[in-house]
Image: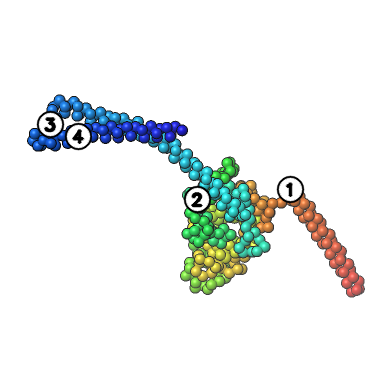
């Protein structure tokens, strides 16, 4: 028998003994009263002063002391053991929840996010030949610990599982939204994801806002103050203007102007990220069709909605035609640095740095590719030389013919 069981047994015995003594004392008083009832009330003997001041009073005071001592000692001891029992029970439930969550994750999530939560790929909803990078989940706490839009990472995980993310391959899982998971199963998966966070996954944060894509409020205010006030220059159009201009508004603005008017407020002037995520490397993670699909239909999350610029829920009427959206995509390509900074690669999904057809490449493939590129360049140069020689021969022939 463990200590908790022994303590409970002692307390039960003490309660039984106290109850028995009280019952015995009450029986004696009852028998006395029965004998006294044989006499008329006026003739029944009462307690003498000595009995009242000593026997009766002392008896009740004694029982009061015993009960006070019992509760004074028993309750703290019980509370100490009960607190430990509750903690042990909660730990066992948590371990069980993580185990259940692992099984649910393996059956429903590992195909896209990886068996080790390191990220992977999902079919793109916009292009059957393209894959969509599924983010790593083993560093989600570090990714969102300073995010302006996420106050509680657990709530963020729970909401994402329950509602999915419209416009992406992330499906709905909550039973309240016609998904397959109960609320308890959602909590199991959340427990498993949080239990699998990698220690030290976050590297040291760079201090330069231009390097890590974080802009402070003062800088944001300055950017907003520098924006032109003319709605024709900055592309700000309300729903009434969109409806008046027709379902597919054709814009003569350049991709840079369209980006500044519609995207920079959330994603930063240079795509470094502000309220919305950084766009550095976005053309590596997604192909042309997927980027166009995101711009057309948006990505809906309750905390950070990415608006749909054609079909979708955000604008009642389409705002820009495909030509305007293609100019935005072209500008996103122009925004990309020659080499993605290491700071921006920190939270990238493993394998996506090679483009939308990402997948783990065997060691040495990059060298092979460099060799192939060099060979292609040499071949192109040779072809160019041959063409030049051919053109020279043709010119000489024409010259001879003319003469």
Residue 332 in the image, given as x and y percentages of width and height = 62, 59
Is the C-beta separation of discs 1 and 3 under 8 Å? no
Q: Residues within 10 Å of mark 1 (few under 14, many from 20)?
A: few
Task: Looking at the image, tell me whether mark 1 or mark 2 is earlier in sequence order.
Answer: 2
Is the C-beta separation of discs 1 and 4 under 8 Å? no
Task: Looking at the image, tell me whether mark 1 or mark 4 is earlier in sequence order.
Answer: 4
Q: Which residue is mark 3?
A: 46
In-image side of 162 versus 402 (left or right): left
- Height in image: 322 above or below 60? below
Q: Which residue is mark 1?
A: 363
Is the C-beta separation of discs 4 and 3 under 8 Å? no
Q: Nearer the viewer, mark 1 or mark 3?
A: 3
Q: How is the image coloured?
A: rainbow
Cα distance in 3D space between marks 1 and 2: 39 Å
Task: Looking at the image, tell me whether mark 1 or mark 3 is earlier in sequence order.
Answer: 3
Task: Looking at the image, tell me whether mark 2 or mark 3 is earlier in sequence order.
Answer: 3
Q: Nearer the viewer, mark 1 or mark 2?
A: 2
């Amino acid at each position: 028998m463990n200590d908790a069981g022994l303590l409970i047994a002692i307390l039960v015995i003490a309660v039984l003994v106290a109850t028995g003594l009280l019952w015995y004392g009450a029986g004696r008083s009852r028998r006395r009263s029965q004998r006294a009832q044989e006499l008329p009330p006026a003739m029944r003997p009462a307690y003498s002063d000595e009995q009242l001041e000593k026997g009766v009073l002392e008896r009740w005071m004694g029982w009061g002391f015993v009960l006070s001592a019992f509760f004074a000692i028993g309750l703290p001891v019980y509370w100490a053991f009960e607190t430990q029992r509750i903690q042990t029970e909660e730990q066992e439930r948590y371990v069980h929840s993580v185990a259940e969550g692992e099984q649910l994750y393996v059956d429903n999530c590992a195909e896209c996010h990886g068996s080790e939560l390191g990220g992977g790929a999902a079919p793109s909803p916009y292009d059957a030949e393209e894959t969509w990078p599924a983010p790593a989940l083993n560093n989600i706490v570090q990714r969102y610990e300073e995010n302006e839009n996420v106050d509680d990472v657990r709530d963020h995980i729970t909401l994402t599982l329950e509602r999915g993310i419209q416009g992406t391959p992330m499906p709905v899982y909550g039973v309240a939204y016609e998904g397959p998971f109960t609320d308890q199963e959602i909590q199991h998966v959340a427990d498993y994801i949080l239990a699998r966070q990698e220690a030290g996954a976050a590297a040291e944060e760079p201090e330069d806002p231009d390097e890590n894509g974080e802009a402070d409020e003062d800088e944001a205010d300055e950017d907003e103050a520098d924006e032109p006030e003319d709605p024709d220059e900055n592309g700000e159009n309300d729903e009434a203007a969109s409806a008046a201009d027709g379902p597919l508004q054709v814009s003569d603005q350049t991709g840079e102007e369209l980006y500044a008017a519609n995207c920079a407020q959330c994603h930063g002037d240079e795509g470094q990220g502000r309220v919305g995520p950084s766009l550095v490397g976005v053309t590596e993670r997604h192909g042309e069709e997927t980027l166009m699909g995101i711009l057309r239909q948006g990505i809906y999350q309750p905390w950070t909605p990415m608006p749909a610029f054609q079909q979708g829920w955000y604008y009642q009427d389409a705002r820009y035609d495909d030509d305007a959206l293609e100019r935005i995509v072209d500008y996103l390509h122009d925004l990309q640095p020659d080499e993605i900074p290491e700071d921006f690669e920190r939270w990238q999904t493993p394998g996506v740095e090679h483009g939308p057809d990402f997948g783990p490449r065997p060691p040495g493939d990059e060298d092979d590719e460099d060799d192939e590129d060099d060979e292609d360049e040499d071949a192109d140069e040779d072809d160019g030389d041959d063409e030049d020689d051919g053109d020279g021969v043709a010119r000489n022939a024409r010259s001879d013919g003319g003469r």
